[in-house]
Amino acid sequence: MKRLQGKIGMQEGISLCALAIVTTSLFTIDSAEFYADGNAGYISVPLSVLIGLLGILPILFAMKKTRSESLSSLLRSALGRGLGAVAALVIIAILFFSALAILSKFVSAVSSFLFYLESGYEKIALWMLATIAVLSFGGFERLGRTAKCFAAFLGICLIIVLLIPIDSYELYRIYPLPGKDFRAIIQDCLSGSIKTLPALLCLCINGQGVHGGHIVRRSSMIACGIGFVLVFAVQLCLGLSFTYMELQELYIPLYRINMGLLTEGYFLRLDKVSLLLWLIGGIITVGFYLYSASLLGLEMYGGTDIRPSLLTGTAILLTIISLAFTEYNNAFNMALGFFENYGFIILLGLLVLIAIIAFLRAKSNKGMEEHA
Amino acid sequence: MKRLTPLLLLCVLMLSGCLKSISVDEYGFVLSIGIDAGQNKKYAYSFLLQHDEGTSSDSGIEFVNHILLSAEGDTLFDAIATIVAGTPYVLNFTRTNNVAFSEEIAMGDGLVDFMALHLNEHKIRPSIKLLVVEGSAQEFLEKLDAQNSPNLAKLLYSLLENYSQLGIIAMTNYTLFMEAILDGRFDPVLTLCAVDKSAERQEEQGGGGGGSQAQEETAGTTGGAERKGGMASYAWGSALFSGTSMVGKLTGEQTKYLLIATGHLEDTYINFTYEGKALNIHMRQGQAPDMSLSLFPTPKASVQVYIDCNIAVDSGDDTVESWDTGLSEALSLYMQGEMQNLFSLCRSLGCDAMGFGQLAVKHFSSTAAWAAYNWREDYAALEVDFSVTLSLQDSYLRGKLE
């Protein structure tokens, strides 16, 4: 089977996963909706990363219990080929939705902030997807090594971007505390887990590529720890830079974080450069999701070569993203909104179900072995 | 792979990073926008452009010629369209540093109309500074030119920053203005600018022309003092806003006390007379002020400021000795009185220039409760106690020769 997977170490796995968690958590937030009733992002977004980790733990332990090296083997052993294929379809759909959420955000941001409108969304989408295709056609190993090259660099850049406007941070902006009522915060935490879970699922799908389940578990925990710290820092700094009323107006608040600065300087005008840096993270993340969805499809539905799946996946992404900026924009946004608000119910429910069945199967298998 | 290599190299040629190429010299970079009342349309917009012109034959140094374009329009975009129709280059706003509103516009609904614009449509940064000009904004931009300044953008922002460090202007940018308007935690205070006719006269006299006409003009100075040289345009003082409308002005001297009360002062000099001796005190705000506010039963606030002082001008002999025996207390009381007067002025104008709303919001635990609360109503009844703690720095350097 030509899976183009290769093998990567734990550092690459952590880089890939942390990059995907941070990028998805920071750049796919719908500001107008998320900050409408106040800003509790510095609580709910980092907590959603931990909830994402909690959500994947049953799967990780089920993989350990059933001695599965990847998600596809767990699906097969727990649900069988038929039901496993259905579950895989749901997971693939969720990975595509996550990829589309990132792509649409970056296509519109690059188009609006860097270019003028006449540049056209579809040209920018094509340019991004060409890069994504080059990465994902190189396979999991290329994705992992690229992520390792950029993850630390992007993390340092993120910290620098947060430090530059330090003079403009004011504590009063984060008030009223805690910004939202606890019910709304819990709801944000739960729905936000859909931004972390796809990255962790991708790591599970590529279990073999990272030398097995125990590395997936450790990588997931470390990546979530890094993600927690970084998204907390960013959300806190955003809260100190903008009131919740301003945050609602900002498409990507991180892009505008230094606009409150009164002093001029070279750093004030690095926002466009920083957007291109975040775009690198977005491209690697989408490549990771695309490759993982294709691999899961290949392993669950049969086939000998991943490249047709990758090509199909790229074509699907390009088609949907091109349609997303036409008259189908409302339908696309509604679907994405539904996925971002309720996707976690489907995914968390599915993962818990898979894990329970896997545990039950493992227990009955063990009983049968002991009986035999 | 061998077959693919030429194809890949061909692809590299297409990866220029440009979707549509426009060379730099085809852009007209707008550094400042001026907004005045129009004759036929609602507004008259002026655009100050930086434009590379050539090289000085004497020094060989490249100089920059500045261009001022102007057009009337109901919106900024109308004026841009009118100007673009008659210029051979594309107006680019990515380097725009400030927008200057004439006083007349600022007192009306000019800021409301400006806020209705989507700045990103022309890639105008939300960090642009907002200025109010006494008189014509167009004239202010015209007089900004300072003898072939190599970089007008740099000159503009360093001018504002230097003035700000002296404490004679307050600065606000579009993001902070929007914050004030959207959330009502404070009222905006903009930089107040004007044109000094005396400096302009001196320039003309130096150039050998217009002397007799200039002598007839007496109006227009820099904060009341005549000046020779430099730009005729200058910034001095602050424009007070209540919501989106300008309601009053502060002099450079009053602005110093506003900055002291809000903790934004860097360096300044204050004149003070003690026991008949004229003093000039150099002040630096080393520590942020302690501010507290209680809303119930009646709104009451206290502000404690800490200032490090040095004596810069001293017409007496024993000033340093008298610091602890009366001078410090007298200066503190004087400063408290100035801040109290300033606060009373701002309150009477309905302008929360000192940002007490930033303290009021801390009394609320939900955005709904804050949104339902009417801070402006409570602000009208707010009483503030100011206290000033002064400490003399370098008191061991007593001799004036030092």
Image (cartoon, coloured by chain):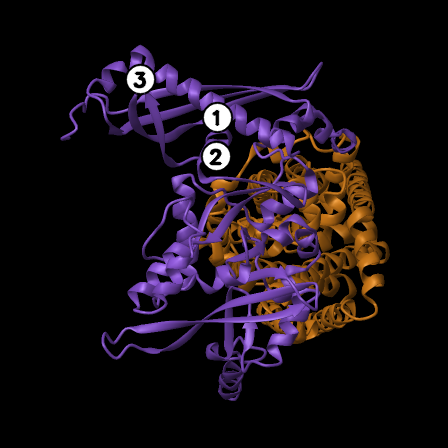
User: Which residue is disc 2 drawn over?
Assistant: B254
**Image spot of residue B168 (x, y percent):** 43, 41
Secondary structure category for the residue under label 3:
loop
Q: Are marks 1 and 2 in contact (CB under 8 Å)?
A: yes
In-image side of B130 versus B389 (left or right) = right
Of the numbered discs 3 and 1, the one sitting upstream in the chain is: 3
Secondary structure category for the residue under label 1:
helix
For the point 35% across and 66% down, the residue is B150
- Disc 1 marks a residue whose amino acid type is Glu
**Image spot of residue A255 (x, y percent):** 58, 54
Q: Colour of chain B?
A: purple
For the point 75% across and 63% down, the residue is A297
Q: Looking at the rendered structure, which numbered label has been put on residue A325?
A: none
In-image side of A210 versus A53 (left or right) = left
Q: How many marks?
A: 3
Query: What distance separates the C-alpha of mark 3 from that of mark 1?
Result: 19 Å
- Disc 2 marks a residue whose amino acid type is Gln
Are the residues under marks 2 and 3 on the same chain? yes
User: Which residue is disc 1 drawn over?
Assistant: B338
Secondary structure category for the residue under label 2:
helix
Q: Looking at the rendered structure, which numbered label has been put on residue B275?
A: 3
- Disc 3 marks a residue whose amino acid type is Glu
Give the answer, above or below, for where A1 lies relative to B296.
below
**Image spot of residue A160 (x, y percent):** 46, 48
Q: Colour of chain A?
A: orange
Read off the chain for label 2.
B
Read off the chain for label 3.
B
